[in-house]
Amino acid sequence: MRNNAEDLALPAWQAAIDPISKLLLILLFTLAAFAAGNLPSALSILAASFILALSTKNLPALWGMCAFSLFLILTMLLIQGLFWPGNHTAAFSVASLTFYQEGLGHAALLACRILTIIFSSSFFIQTATISENARYLENSGLSYQQVYVLMSVCYILPQMQENLRKIQLAQKARGIAPAKSLLSRIKNLFPVLLPLIVKSFQQAMNRSIALQLRGYASPKRRAASLTNDYWKDKFCHRLLIASCLVLLGVKACLTIFN
């Protein structure tokens, strides 16, 4: 998670995209993923978001964000493959358990939607600093409370990833051997999951109190000036909003006529 512009060295085209356009890109990819009614179209949207995330050239951070969703995806494949109401075509059997094609396909569609949101969010997180995001959003007319809530939501996964890394380092320093297999890593994650979530929320509350004590809630406070020049930000906003509305309209029409 980057806090200052000095931590970031971006290609020109990434630096030219303003924070609101990047947020609208997340919305556009999310709507496109949910509008996709079949697995091939969902995979094509997933591929586009993956290419966008790869352009940040920060694979460790991307993998760290995906790791939190792997358990959820595996759980969906298990439950939907076995118990989805539309199951009727057997795909394969493991011991006495039979997995069905329809349930696995539905779970794969849901997994594509989750990963699409993560990949598009990763592009936003890795190509913008917290300070520049806050400055731009405040200059756009949002209050500092709204900006803080939005930034907290967008950066919750990187924050949890950093807290998890600290916990793992502390465990290693105490002589606990790191897990080697994927199954062992999942088992070791459960005991620290609740403290991890609680610590992340505590940090968010502490930051909120610190901002209030520094006078960020004062009506006399002026938003800081922008440090970057963005390429046709208003035009990009209108284009992306129009694209989102078109997707919503197409999805509504397909739902009505089907």
Image (spheres, rainbow, N blue to C red):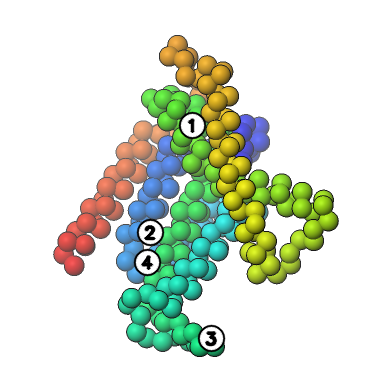
Compute the Cα span from label 3 to label 1: 48 Å
Relative image position of residue 90 (x, y in whole percent): 41, 87
**177 or 140, nearer to the observer:** 177
Observer able to see residue 109 = yes
Q: Quadrant of residue 155?
A: top right
Which residue is identified by label 1? Answer: 148
Q: Is residue 138 left or right of residue 235?
A: right
Compute the Cα span from label 4 to label 1: 35 Å
Which residue is identified by label 3? Answer: 94
Helix, strand or loop for disc 2: helix
Q: Nearer the viewer, mark 3 or mark 1?
A: 3
Which of pointers 3 and 2 lies earlier in the amino acid sequence? Answer: 2
Q: What's the residue type where badge 3 is placed?
A: Val
Compute the Cα span from label 4 to label 3: 29 Å
Helix, strand or loop for disc 1: helix
Which of pointers 4 and 3 lies earlier in the amino acid sequence? Answer: 4
Q: Nearer the viewer, mark 4 or mark 2?
A: 2
Q: Is residue 258 left or right of residue 112?
A: left
Q: What's the residue type where badge 1 is placed?
A: Tyr
Q: Is the residue 90 above or below the residue 131 in the image?
A: below
Relative image position of residue 182 (x, y in whole percent): 66, 68
Q: Contact (CB < 8 A) between labels 3 and 2?
A: no
Q: Nearer the viewer, mark 3 or mark 2?
A: 3
Which of pointers 4 and 2 lies earlier in the amino acid sequence? Answer: 2
Relative image position of residue 52 (x, y in whole percent): 50, 53
Q: Quadrant of residue 5?
A: top right
Which residue is identified by label 2? Answer: 33
Which residue is identified by label 4? Answer: 41
Compute the Cα span from label 2 to label 1: 27 Å
Compute the Cα span from label 3 to label 2: 31 Å
Q: Residues within 10 Å of mark 2 (few under 14, many from 20)?
A: many
**124 or 54, nearer to the observer:** 124
